[in-house]
Amino acid sequence: MLEAFKEKATDREGQVLRWEVTNKKGERGWVPERYLRRQGKSAIATTGYDTTTLDPSEGDVLTVIEEDTESGWVWCHDNTGNLGWFAIDHLAQSDR
C-alpha cells in the first residue's frame, strides 16, 4: 500500500500523469497514475515500478533503455552505469 499523496503532475489539458507517493518505509517517488488504484488518500500499486531518478550534469551522456512517452520520462543509464528515470523534455539528441 502506498500512502500520502503529495503532489501530482499534469499535462497541458490538466490530465494527471503521475503522483508523488510515499511507501510504508517512508521512501518517496513519482509513479504514473496508470500504475495506481487509488483508495482515498492511499493507493495500491497495480504493477511493480522503480521510482529511481537520475540527476545528471549538463552535457552528461545518457543511454535510453526504455521510453515512456505517456508519462514523458525515459529509463536510462549514465556513463557510470547508474540506472533511473529522466524527463524526456530535458534531453537533447547526441551524435555519440
Image (cartoon, grey):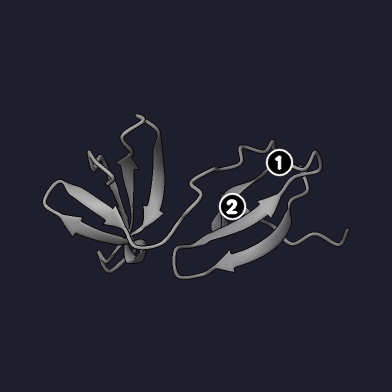
Q: Residue furthest top?
A: 26
Q: Would you call the spot at circle 2 few (<14 residues within 10 Å), some (14-19), or many (20 or more)? A: few
1 or 2: tag closer to the N-terminus? 1
User: Left or right: where does residue 73 sit relative to residue 20?
Assistant: right
- Position of the C terminus by quadrant: bottom right
x and y percentages locating residue 38 in the rendered image = 20, 57
Q: Nearer the viewer, residue 12 or 29?
A: 29
Q: Which quadrant holds residue 17?
A: bottom left
Q: Label 1: state its secondary structure.
A: loop
Q: Nearer the viewer, residue 70 or 44?
A: 44
Q: Residue furthest right?
A: 96
Q: Which mark is residue 30?
A: none
Identify which residue is drawn at 51% across, 49% down.
Answer: 50
* Mark 1 and mark 2: Cα distance apart in space: 18 Å
Identify which residue is drawn at 27% across, 66% down.
Answer: 15
Query: Which circle, 1 or 2, is nearer the viewer?
Result: 1
According to the picture, the residue beneath numbered tag 2 turns out to be 90
Identify which residue is drawn at 45% across, 56% down.
Answer: 48
- Identity, as a three-letter code, of the amino acid under mark 2: His
- Identity, as a three-letter code, of the amino acid under mark 1: Asn
Q: Label 2: state its secondary structure.
A: helix
x and y percentages locating residue 14 in the rendered image = 25, 64
Q: Would you call the spot at circle 1 few (<14 residues within 10 Å), some (14-19), or many (20 or more)? A: few
User: Left or right: where does residue 48 sit relative to residue 38?
Assistant: right
User: Left or right: where does residue 66 sit relative to residue 27?
Assistant: right
Question: For the image shown, how many numbered marks are present on the structure?
Answer: 2
Q: Nearer the viewer, residue 84 or 58?
A: 84
x and y percentages locating residue 78 in the rendered image = 75, 45
According to the picture, the residue beneath numbered tag 1 turns out to be 82
- Confirm or deny contact between disc 1 and disc 2 (CB under 8 A): no
- Examine the rendered structure and indicate whether residue 29 appears above or below residue 71: above
x and y percentages locating residue 20 in the rendered image = 33, 44
